[in-house]
Amino acid sequence: MSKKRVEEADSYLKVHWYMQETPAWKALSAAARAVYLQLGHHYNGRNNGKIAYSVRQAADECNICKETAAKALKELMALGFIEETRHGSFSKKTSIASEWRLTAFYCDLTKSPKTCAFMHREAQARDLHQPRSRASMEPLPCPHCGEAIQAAPREKILLRVMPKDS
């Protein structure tokens, strides 16, 4: 009598095309994208909202310094890709990693649906970085709520040249 082997499903992180086409994704730095992918590596499909991930861990896994890792996590929060569900701490007595939620997926902690917060952060993305092309300014429908996000008109940037003191 042979026993049937139960194969475990491959675990992977879905980075949807619609997410990659948003102005928020295009505004992310390379370090923030790397941290997002590594954070997603710790998501197993059942722990969203309880993903323990520290700045030091991000720095080690992405081969970047701690300051860059902290900045990347703040950038991901500001643009709506992740939310902090529990703030961690680091001291001589305790070392508790912060817990995170990926907003593109169902939250297992609060049982709330995905928020697609990054789809509605075009203004923050524009403030953080200049869009790479005019095509990125076209409105995109949110796959979660169906609402079209309209691009705000660009403001003219005035540069003042200061005279050199001799």
Image (tube, helix red, strand yellow):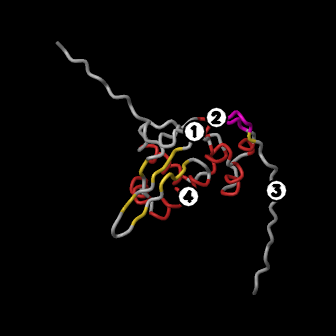
Furthest-front residue in view?
A: 110
Q: Give the range drawn in magenta.
A: 140-148
The mark lying in front, picked from 4 and 3, is 4
Q: Mark 1 or mark 4, which has the lower sequence index?
A: 4
Distance in Å between CA atoms under marks 1 and 4: 20 Å
Distance in Å between CA atoms under marks 1 and 3: 32 Å
Q: Mark 1 or mark 3, which has the lower sequence index?
A: 1
Element on which disc 4 rests: helix
Screen quadrant of the N terminus: top left
Screen quadrant of the C terminus: bottom right
On residue 144, the disc is: 2
**Toward which corner of the image does residue 65 lie, by quadrant?**
bottom left
In the rendered image, which residue does mark 1 sit on?
Answer: 114
Q: Which amino acid lies under the numbered mark 3 shown in the image of this protein?
A: Glu
- Rate crowding at label 3 as few (under 14), some (14 to 19) or many (20 or more) other CA atoms within 10 Å: few
In the rendered image, which residue does mark 4 sit on?
Answer: 74
The mark lying in front, picked from 2 and 3, is 2
Distance in Å between CA atoms under marks 4 and 3: 26 Å
Distance in Å between CA atoms under marks 2 and 1: 8 Å
Element on which disc 2 rests: loop
The mark lying in front, picked from 2 and 4, is 2
Q: Position of residue 112 (x, y in %)?
A: 55, 39
Magenta residues, dominant SS class: loop
Q: Which amino acid lies under the numbered mark 2 shown in the image of this protein?
A: His
Q: Mark 2 or mark 1, which has the lower sequence index?
A: 1
Q: Is 16 a magenta residue?
A: no
On residue 155, the disc is: 3
Q: Position of residue 98 (x, y in %)?
A: 45, 56
On residue 165, the disc is: none
